[in-house]
Image (spheres, helix red, strand yellow):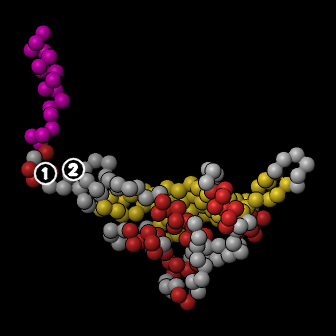
Amino acid sequence: MQSTVSMSSSDKPSSATSASIADWAQVNIAVWAAQGRIDERAVPLAGFARLVEEAVTDVGDAQVHVVLSAQERDASKGAGEPIAKQVWLRIEAQTYVPLTCQRCLSPVATELVVSQDLRFVSSEDQAAFEDEEAEEDVLALELVLDVQALIEDELIMAMPVVPMHSDCQPEGWQASEPLIEDKPNPFAGLATLKKVQ
Ligand SMILES: [Zn+2]
């Protein structure tokens, strides 16, 4: 999972919404980890362009709740070997995105929840090799990391394949079958039972 960090500040919209997450675009994650940094914020969904693209209605002032926790962990390779420090980042995020309900075809506010550990290793090859087996995502450690793009990647991966209301009827259903007639009377069965006895 590669993120580009080439975007200069002049390429970004100058609105206040993107300004509040601008510092996530260029993060020295090794420094964050050494500091044990925890960054908790509610930021505008409007600042996540790829998510906004998926939204079927205006996202307005919807928020994304984010908790980033960076830390160094010891990676001991065995007795007698030097203990290496590894850089980890935990991304927790939650938001609602309006998607199209695949049953009634109207918008449905779909909750996206992310809770993902990322581990950084020294090279692309190492990352590709270790990512196969690891439970966490393994990425190559870059000097400057676009953390906002990583958060957005994770939120996009958390999107359901088939967004749906918890209770709705297929589009056009009411036109052919009125709701009242179709609902069975919950006491109907009871009455029948009584007659039989
Ligand atoms: Zn629906």
Marked residue nearer the N-terminal end (2 or 1):
2
Quick one: SS at disc 1?
Answer: helix
**Residue 118 appears in view:** no
Residue 196: percent from left, percent from top: 10, 12
Residue 37: percent from left, percent from top: 71, 64
- Please tell me the numbered disc located at residue 136: none
- Residue 31 against residue 15 in the figure, above or below: above
Residue under pointer 1: 174
Residue 175: percent from left, percent from top: 9, 53
- Residue 87 against residue 47 in the figure, above or below: above
Q: CA distance from mark 2 to mark 1?
A: 8 Å
What kind of secondary structure does the magenta stretch mostly adopt?
helix
Q: Which residues are magenta?
A: 180-197
Q: Which sits in the foreground, 17 or 31?
A: 31
The amino acid pointed to by label 1 is Gln
**Residue 47 appears in view:** yes
Residue at 20% from the left image edge and 52% from the top image edge: 170
- Please tell me the numbered disc located at residue 169: 2
State yes or no: Cβ of the residue under disc 2 lies below 8 Å from any atom of ligand 1.
yes
Residue at 75% from the left image edge and 69% from the top image edge: 31
Is residue 83 highlighted in magenta? no
* Quarter of the image where one finds residue 88: bottom right
Residue 16: percent from left, percent from top: 51, 81
How many numbered callouts?
A: 2
Crowd tier of the residue under label 1, counting other residues whose Cα lies within 10 Å: few below 14, some 14–19, many 20 or above:
few
Residue at 56% from the left image edge and 54% from the top image edge: 115
Q: Which sits in the foreground, 77 or 60?
A: 77
Is residue 191 highlighted in magenta? yes
The amino acid pointed to by label 2 is Gln
Q: Quadrant of the N terminus?
A: bottom right
For the residues bearing labels 2 and 1, Cβ distance under 8 angstroms:
yes
